[in-house]
Image (tube, rainbow, N blue to C red):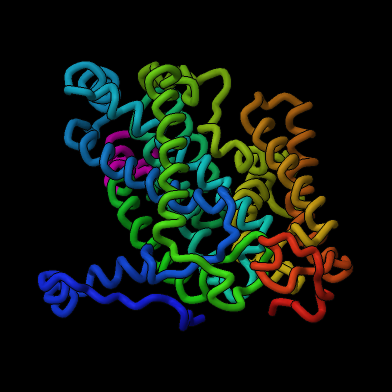
């Protein structure tokens, strides 16, 4: 989509004119995040979370680079280098370690809100399918990075988490055990595992940054979605990104950093597991092996299968866990409604909030002991998760009667409640 009303970059200072001619970085920045990029005038604070995710990644990369300078990736030294050397001997090491550890949790908090915002407002629909697909790729890469980062701390939960999670790959017929040995670099987590995971944990954030650039590039082609889901009709529906949304994002970033700082300075271990302050011991299994909180919903799906049916239960669990994420790739085609925003889809809005509750239940079950009550509850929640995307959402998209849409973003902003029938404003 082109925006003929967007302002063109015209450098006035001779140095900037020369730079624009030789290496047009100022023009690129102006068109990407400046007055040259018009955005819908009705974006709410849920649209701040894309910028917050970028800020969270930047914090992780900066703190991670410094921490890597003091980390020893060996089974004998990893735990002590983190909890001894970095925390006690490195200047501000405790701050860097806590910022990096809690930064991972905050990155996932921001990312989950960003994803569910996209689900509610239909940001995965045409013409923004590629934006959504690249977002899911970022999510997968972030999960892999976080898992490997959690392992290299080499506490009890790190070691046994690696042992259990990689052990599930052995359920894959014929090649499963070979994949597990290849991932670990041996038959159990050890030096080879630490070296491999540390290398990938250091590398993947830069890969994520590259995919984020593609994500933003793909977004700038059709332009941003908005709470109404109605396409912009002209200059009256948009405002320049700068200064309107740079100011808004700046305020959101200030709030984010304030909350982040409070957690670092006052509750640095609240989001972690106490067993990870115990050195890894292959001979002592923790009473309750559990991953980090942001993996709990998927862990609940993983262990929801307890009986063999054609395939082993362990294999069903692995397939379901990966399938629950891969399912998001097909969402733009599973939801066939021409209306983007759930604000105008009453049935889809109810289903969305039921899905939110279901994911919360999955998270609760995934973080709870493997008692029968939590397993059964997790099985019900896992079944509903797949039903939502594969059955409920497609049926709703073909049967519900949406509320009339506004004629334009300006009409919605100014409070004119007149509308047109969805058939006239359906969005392909």
Q: Is residue 74 left or right of residue 214?
A: left
| Residue ID at (81%, 68%) | 418
Question: Can you give x and y, in whole percent of width and height, for residue 267 in the image?
Answer: 45, 19
Relative to 332, residue 196 above or below: above
The span picked out in magenta is 184-199
- Which secondary structure class fits the magenta region best? helix
Per the image, is 416 magenta? no
Relative to 416, residue 379 above or below: above
Please tell me which residue lies in front, 254 or 87.
Answer: 254
Question: Can you give x and y, in whole percent of width and height, for residue 128 in the image?
Answer: 56, 71
Please tell me which residue lies in front, 47 or 170.
Answer: 47
Residue 339, picture quadrant: bottom right
Per the image, is 190 magenta? yes
| Residue ID at (48%, 82%) | 2
Residue 156, picture quadrant: top left
The count of marks equals 0
Quarter occupied by the C terminus? bottom right
Q: Is residue 336 visible?
A: no
Relative to 101, residue 113 above or below: below
Question: Can you give x and y, in whole percent of width and height, for residue 243 in the image?
Answer: 40, 57
| Residue ID at (71%, 44%) | 356
Question: Can you give x and y, in whole percent of width and height, for residue 19 in the image?
Answer: 14, 72
Please tell me which residue lies in front, 386 or 136.
Answer: 136
Residue 427, picture quadrant: bottom right
| Residue ID at (80%, 58%) | 348
């Amino acid at each position: 989509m082109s925006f003929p009303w967007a302002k063109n970059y015209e450098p006035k200072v001779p140095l900037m004119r020369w730079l624009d001619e030789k290496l047009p970085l100022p023009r690129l920045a102006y068109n990407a995040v400046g007055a040259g990029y018009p955005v819908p005038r009705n974006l709410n604070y849920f649209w701040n979370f894309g910028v917050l995710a970028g800020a969270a990644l930047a914090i992780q990369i900066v703190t991670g680079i410094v921490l890597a300078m003091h980390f020893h990736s060996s089974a004998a030294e990893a735990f002590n280098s983190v909890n001894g050397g970095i925390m006690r001997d490195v200047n501000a090491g405790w701050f860097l370690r806590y910022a990096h550890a809690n930064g991972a949790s905050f990155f996932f908090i921001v990312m989950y809100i960003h994803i569910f915002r996209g689900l509610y407002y239909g940001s995965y629909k045409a013409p923004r399918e590629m934006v959504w697909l690249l977002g899911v790729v970022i999510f997968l890469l972030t999960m892999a990075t976080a898992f490997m980062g959690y392992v290299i701390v080499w506490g009890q939960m790190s070691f046994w988490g690696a042992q259990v999670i990689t052990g599930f790959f052995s359920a894959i017929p014929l090649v499963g055990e070979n994949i597990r040995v290849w991932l670990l670099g041996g038959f159990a987590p050890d030096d080879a595992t630490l070296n491999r995971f540390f290398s990938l944990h250091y590398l993947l954030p830069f890969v994520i940054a590259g995919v984020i650039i593609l994500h933003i590039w793909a977004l700038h082609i059709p332009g941003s979605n908005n709470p109404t889901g109605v396409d912009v009709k002209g200059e009256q529906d948009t405002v320049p990104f700068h200064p309107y949304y740079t100011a808004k994002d700046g305020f959101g970033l200030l709030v984010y950093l304030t909350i982040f700082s409070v957690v670092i300075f006052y509750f640095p271990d609240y989001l972690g597991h106490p067993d990870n302050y115990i050195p890894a011991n292959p001979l002592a299994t923790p009473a309750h092996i559990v991953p980090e909180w942001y993996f709990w919903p998927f862990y609940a799906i993983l262990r929801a299968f307890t009986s063999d049916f054609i395939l082993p239960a362990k294999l069903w669990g692995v397939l379901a866990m990966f399938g629950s994420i891969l399912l998001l790739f097909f969402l733009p085609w599973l939801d066939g409604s021409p209306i983007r925003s759930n604000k105008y889809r009453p049935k889809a809005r109810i289903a969305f909030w039921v899905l939110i509750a279901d994911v919360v239940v999955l998270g609760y079950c995934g973080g709870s002991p493997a008692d029968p009550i939590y397993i059964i509850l997790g099985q019900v929640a896992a079944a509903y998760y797949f039903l939502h995307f594969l059955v409920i959402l497609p049926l709703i998209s073909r049967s519900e009667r949406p509320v009339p849409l506004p004629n334009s973003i300006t009409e919605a902003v100014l409070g004119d409640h007149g509308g047109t029938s969805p058939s006239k404003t359906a969005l392909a």
